[in-house]
């Protein structure tokens, strides 16, 4: 055998400096700094000036603590929206914002006070607000840097803050629009109240947790009744809130409920619903004997109670407790549990309040803001807090006093149920009747009631996913009037003056204009007693008016951001209404809804055209993340270990519209997915080394395989465009990665390796391949840029060093090429079958590779260069339907390694390689 030449230097292998090892944690900050130095956000704005706008209005995260994984997912999705819309050629600015007022920040400042043994109430309000402002600004600055690290492109130097004086002035102006249009009132009704935080709460600030409460049965002696047998008997009520008994004012019955009254084992006659007698006996520890009970039992419909009066078990205390307790018909009374009779405390329940008010019974305001009874209250005055389990326990003061008075029949601390808690302090809340400011949902106004306008706006809005429409619709349909007032210090004040004689708020546009101007200039501190007469002007005297000191619900703040951010002109790139609001699904009762109500009340429509919601991020096992479980995952740590692009790829790969998971194994899978995408870019860069326009070949002159790949690229392009339209980023990423892995790496690149490495540079097939690779490069780097923002920049700069950013590019123009899909589907399926037939022979060492295989396929297989498609030595057609494989007896080319008849001995050259090597040698010799 002749000694063969080493032909490796003659092979045209891909050449690139682009590394396979990403090193994202080190590279990304460098790229980020370059963007900041170049002012990439402004450059993008300038490049899209005058184009169709797409406005995503940022829902403000709370300026309190480090960014968590939910923040990261949320902002990556927002960035994907803006980047894909920008890629389509639209002007899609992104102005980030922060919610800066409210209880959580007050709470943190007060914690510092407690450590220093300072009393917040002794600190001047302006000084306290200044500390809250500083605390909020600190976390705005921290979160801003963390979010920038994710590669979020936004106007970071000019974000919106709800504590900005112009924002505070705008919020005041929006409030006064409600006042001027009559969509505001002050009333006393039970609202959710946090005794720990000493303020009213909105439904959106409440979460429900399972707890165990004390349940008690209490006897109220009936002193008057149209049914003679009931006089002297005891109406039995059951409750899980013993602390409300000291504020009881009436009893409610169901008019259609069937009741029974008879002697019990203790010798007293009791009245309970017929369906609940046995359960009542069980709680009292008595054996229920129907015969004994029925001996002297009377049965009647609840409506027969009409005119009956009971007395409080603590009536001996006199005063409030000695007043008669009327028995009133309530259609809310059921026999699901309890006794079928309900004690009424109008201070502490919506049904209680409404029923008592209808019968002239008013609240008494016995429970103070801190959860204690008033000092002058006749029973347990100054004691509490009412949410303290020990205070309500079977051996606590309430039950002990009732037991001594003969009113307590049963008490046990074993009732499991769901109960509202403040989502900030995690403490139990109560219903408490206090004077508050409300927005009425059902008051007639121009264009209908607020509920009607909001319902219509929901119908006119696009929801992604669609189920969001029903969710927010049901909430708006059933929600009570909006409680606007909070009894705290750090927030936007309710800037109203109330007439001391009439109780009506002053509605004077001139006064309102002065107030708005003052807050715009000086912020919330401008609303003080010192300047009050100034705002009232010469027409009114301050002595005649009460200056309201409550602040606004923070949901009103964030619900008004559309006015400040989109309409103020401070961000001229923006416009009203927004195309899209995007937040977590919990915001159907939060920001989506407060923005909807605020805008419908002041502008008659929603401030958005579409709403996109995402689910919550769970741990790898599908459990909710919490510090107590130790399963939280920090996006800051993930970026340090993996890089931001891995985190972005995860966020855009999951089905974010549902709850989704993250964990080490999941991220390892995402990292593998990233490596495959990176490898695709690396291959393209290497394979296109030295490519020039002179090499480009028209589509019509390309082989069928190249035309087929351009057709697949066009199909991918359409899929990605639709995914952008649908905000379906899971499909976007999956389609992109599947194309790179299955259509390119495992198919096209694999087949054309031989052509790239071994054909002459001037060969039309190789030119066609490289032309398609160039088209693929420009398409894929653009498609990938909104997802892998840092990697796409690295890829682009690797091919075009020193050029403008990849993020200034627009959606690629892809050649329209028609494809015979059935034919290619058949060819690819046959290729898969051939590979499956070759694999066992490779494992058994019969074949070194597919290049040594002689394949026989059914005679009816489609016409094509099958040996090229299958990467085998030769392909024959046979009579049967099976695919068979044997080893070729031909010799192996020393350059391309193909086994071909013209190769005279192993290591010699085939005709194609001989011609190419000769040309290389001639060029070297010239």
Image (tube, rainbow, N blue to C red):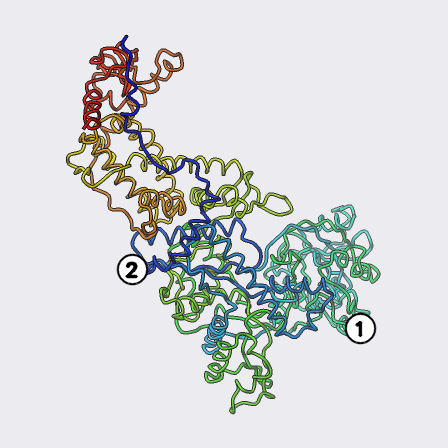
185 is higher (above) or lower (below) than 841: below
Total marks drawn? 2
- The image position of residue 216, as x and y in percent, is 74, 55
Look at the image and tell me in which quarter the N terminus lies: top left
Q: CA distance from mark 1 to mark 2?
A: 74 Å
862 is higher (above) or lower (below) than 222: above
Viewer-proximal residue, 907 or 920? Answer: 920
Q: Residues within 10 Å of mark 1 (few under 14, many from 20)?
A: few
Look at the image and tell me in which quarter the C terminus lies: top left
Viewer-proximal residue, 352 or 4? Answer: 4
- The image position of residue 821, as x and y in percent, is 24, 32
Residue positioned most to the top: 1
What residue is shown with label 1?
Answer: 318
Viewed as shown, does residue 336 lie left or right of 719? right
816 is higher (above) or lower (below) than 850: below
What residue is shown with label 2?
Answer: 52
SS for callout 2: loop
């Amino acid at each position: 055998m002749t000694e063969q030449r080493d032909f490796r230097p003659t092979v045209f292998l891909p050449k690139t400096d682009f590394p396979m090892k990403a090193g994202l944690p080190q590279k990304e900050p460098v790229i980020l700094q370059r963007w900041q130095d170049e002012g990439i956000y402004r450059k993008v704005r300038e490049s899209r000036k005058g184009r169709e706008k797409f406005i995503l209005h940022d829902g403000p995260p709370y300026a309190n603590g480090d960014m968590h994984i939910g923040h990261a997912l949320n902002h990556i999705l927002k960035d994907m929206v803006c980047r894909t819309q920008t890629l389509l050629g639209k002007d899609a600015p992104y102005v980030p914002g922060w919610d800066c007022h409210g209880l959580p920040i007050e709470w943190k400042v007060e914690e510092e006070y407690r450590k220093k043994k300072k009393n917040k109430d002794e600190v001047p309000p302006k000084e306290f607000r200044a500390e809250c402002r500083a605390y909020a600004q600190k976390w705005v600055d921290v979160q801003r840097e963390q979010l920038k690290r994710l590669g979020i492109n936004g106007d970071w130097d000019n974000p919106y803050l709800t504590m900005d004086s112009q924002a505070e002035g705008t919020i005041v102006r929006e409030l006064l629009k409600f006042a001027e249009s009559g969509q505001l009132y002050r009333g006393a009704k039970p609202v959710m109240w946090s005794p720990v935080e000493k303020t009213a709460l909105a439904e959106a600030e409440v979460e429900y947790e399972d707890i165990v409460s004390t349940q008690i049965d209490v006897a109220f002696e009936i002193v008057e009744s149209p049914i003679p047998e009931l006089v002297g008997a005891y109406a039995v009520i059951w409750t899980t809130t013993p602390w409300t008994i000291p504020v009881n004012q009436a009893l409610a019955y169901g008019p259609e409920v069937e009741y029974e009254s008879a002697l019990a084992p203790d010798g007293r006659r009791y009245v309970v619903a017929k369906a609940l007698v046995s359960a009542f006996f069980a709680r009292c520890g008595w054996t229920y004997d129907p015969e004994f009970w029925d001996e002297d039992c009377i049965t009647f419909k609840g409506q027969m109670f009409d005119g009956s009066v009971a007395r409080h078990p603590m009536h001996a205390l006199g005063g409030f407790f000695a007043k008669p307790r009327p028995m009133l018909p309530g259609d809310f009374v059921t026999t699901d549990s309890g006794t079928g009779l309900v004690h009424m405390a109008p201070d502490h329940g919506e049904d209680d309040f409404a029923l008592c008010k209808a019968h002239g019974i008013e609240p008494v305001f016995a429970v103070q803001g801190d959860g204690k009874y008033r000092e002058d209250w006749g029973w347990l005055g100054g004691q509490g807090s009412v949410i303290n389990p020990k205070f309500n326990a079977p051996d606590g003061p309430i039950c002990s006093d009732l037991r001594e008075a003969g009113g307590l029949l049963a008490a046990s601390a074993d009732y499991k149920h769901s109960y509202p808690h403040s989502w900030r302090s995690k403490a139990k809340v109560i219903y408490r009747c206090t004077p508050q400011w409300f927005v009425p949902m059902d008051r007639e106004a121009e264009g209908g009631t607020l509920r009607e306008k909001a319902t219509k706006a929901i119908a006119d809005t696009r929801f992604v996913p669609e189920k969001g429409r029903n969710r927010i619709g049901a909430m708006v349909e059933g929600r009570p009037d909006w409680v606007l007032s909070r009894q705290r210090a750090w927030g936007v004040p309710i800037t109203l003056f109330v007439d001391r004689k009439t109780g009506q708020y002053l509605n004077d546009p001139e006064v309102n204009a002065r107030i708005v101007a003052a807050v715009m200039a000086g912020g919330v501190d401008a609303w003080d007693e010192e300047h009050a007469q100034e705002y009232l002007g010469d027409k009114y005297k301050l002595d005649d008016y009460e200056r309201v000191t409550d602040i606004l619900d923070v949901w009103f703040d964030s619900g008004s951001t559309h006015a400040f951010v989109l309409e103020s002109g401070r961000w001229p790139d923006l416009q009203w209404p927004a195309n899209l609001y995007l937040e977590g699904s919990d915001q159907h009762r939060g920001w989506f809804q407060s923005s909807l109500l605020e805008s419908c009340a002041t502008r008659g429509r929603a401030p958005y055209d579409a709403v996109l919601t995402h689910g919550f991020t769970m741990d790898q096992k599908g459990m909710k993340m919490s510090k107590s479980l130790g399963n939280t995952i920090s996006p800051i740590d993930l970026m340090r270990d993996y890089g931001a692009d891995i985190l972005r790829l995860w966020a855009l790969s999951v089905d974010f519209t549902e709850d989704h998971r993250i964990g080490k194994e999941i991220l390892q899978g995402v990292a593998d997915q990233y490596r495959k995408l990176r490898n695709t870019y690396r291959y393209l860069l290497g394979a296109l080394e030295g490519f020039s326009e002179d090499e480009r070949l028209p589509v019509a002159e390309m082989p069928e395989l190249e035309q087929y790949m351009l057709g697949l690229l066009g199909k991918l392009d359409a899929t990605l465009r639709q995914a952008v339209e649908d905000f379906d980023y899971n499909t976007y990423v999956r389609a992109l990665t599947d194309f790179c892995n299955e259509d390119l790496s495992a198919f096209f690149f694999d087949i054309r390796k031989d052509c790239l490495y071994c054909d002459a540079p001037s060969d039309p097939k190789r030119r066609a391949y490289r032309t398609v690779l160039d088209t693929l490069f420009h398409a894929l780097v653009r498609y990938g840029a909104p997802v892998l923002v840092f990697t796409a920049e690295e890829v682009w700069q690797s091919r075009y060093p020193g050029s403008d950013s990849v993020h200034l590019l627009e959606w690629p123009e892809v050649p329209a090429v028609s494809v015979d899909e059935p034919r290619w589907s058949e060819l690819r399926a046959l290729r898969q079958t051939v590979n499956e037939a070759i694999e066992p022979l490779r494992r058994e060492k019969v074949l070194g590779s597919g290049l040594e295989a002689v394949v026989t396929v059914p005679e009816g297989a489609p016409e094509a260069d099958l040996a090229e498609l299958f990467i085998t030595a030769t392909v024959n057609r046979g009579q049967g339907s099976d695919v068979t494989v044997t080893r070729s007896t031909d010799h192996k080319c020393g350059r391309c390694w193909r086994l071909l008849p013209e190769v005279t001995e192993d290591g010699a050259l085939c005709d194609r390689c001989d011609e190419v090597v000769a040309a290389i040698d001639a060029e070297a010799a010239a």
